[in-house]
Image (cartoon, rainbow, N blue to C red):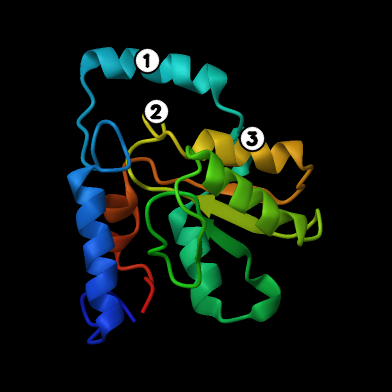
Amino acid sequence: MYISTAKSGCTQIALGMLLLLIMGLSCPTGLFAQQSSLQKTSNADSKARDPWKAQDLMAPSELARLIESGSKSEQPIILSVGPAALIKGSRDIGPASQAENLAQLKKTLEKLPKDQDIVIYCGCCPFTHCPNVRPAFNLLKEMHFTHAKLLNLEHNIRTDWIDKGFATQQ
């Protein structure tokens, strides 16, 4: 079920969370931050400090395909390390830039095998500005998870997931 067609109280909660995202409460530059030429220059600096490599990124269409397949054997653990768990089947950890949420992520990960397929995402803003994805991804690497992926939401969750019609929470 998609946010636009759901008719439950959960929809109101999801829309409220989306409103918080739009207002930019969890990202210093807001959800729909436009990149200036100065920001584009800082993108190169950001890539130098990114803890992930190209093979660590998962395309939104790939995750959407896995979710829609319904195959339990193919389903990764999907963790939202941002302000809201909007992707279907994802678990809300909370913004990983906050120590208590990073500790919650660690507690969640400690229960999983090191070869578990895991996908994390935030989506509050582009990676270059996101305060949540780096601490979360660093933790996955420090804990030696071998099948950890970062959902490649280049712009934000609305542009790269919701607007494409991919499955959201009910």
Q: Secondary structure at mark 1?
A: helix
Q: Which class describes the residues within 10 Å of circle 1: few (<14), some (14-19), or many (20+)?
A: some
Q: Earlier in the sequence, mark 3 or mark 2?
A: 2
Quickly name the residue at label 2. Answer: 128
Q: Is residue 112 left or right of residue 61?
A: right
**Disc 1 residue type?**
Ser
Q: Are marks 1 and 2 in contact (CB under 8 Å)?
A: yes
Q: Nearer the viewer, residue 68 or 168?
A: 168
Circle 3 or circle 2, nearest the eye: 3
Label 2 Cα crowd, 10 Å radius (few <14 / some 14-19 / many 20+): many
3 or 1: mark nearer the eye: 3
**Label 2 residue SS:** loop
Q: Residue 157 vs residue 37: left or right?
A: right
- Residue 61 in the image: x percent, y percent? 45, 60
Question: Where residue 126 appears, x then y in whole percent?
Answer: 35, 36
Q: Which residue is mark 3?
A: 138
Label of residue 23 in the image: none
Residues at marks 1 and 2, CA–CA distance in whole angstroms:
8 Å
Identify the element where label 3 is drawn.
helix
Most extreme residue toward the front is: 100
| Picture quadrant where residue 162 is located | bottom left
Quarter that holds the C terminus: bottom left
Q: Residues within 10 Å of mark 3 (few under 14, many from 20)?
A: some
Residue 28 percent across, percent down from the top left? 28, 31
Residue bearing the label numbered 1: 42
Residue at 22 percent across and 74 percent down: it is 12
Contact between marks 3 and 1 (CB within 8 A): the answer is no
- Left or right of 159? Residue 131 is right
Say which of 30 and 2 sits in front.
30
Residue under the image location 71 percent in, 38 percent down: 141
Tally of marks? 3
Give the residue displayed 44% in from the left and 71% down from the top: 88
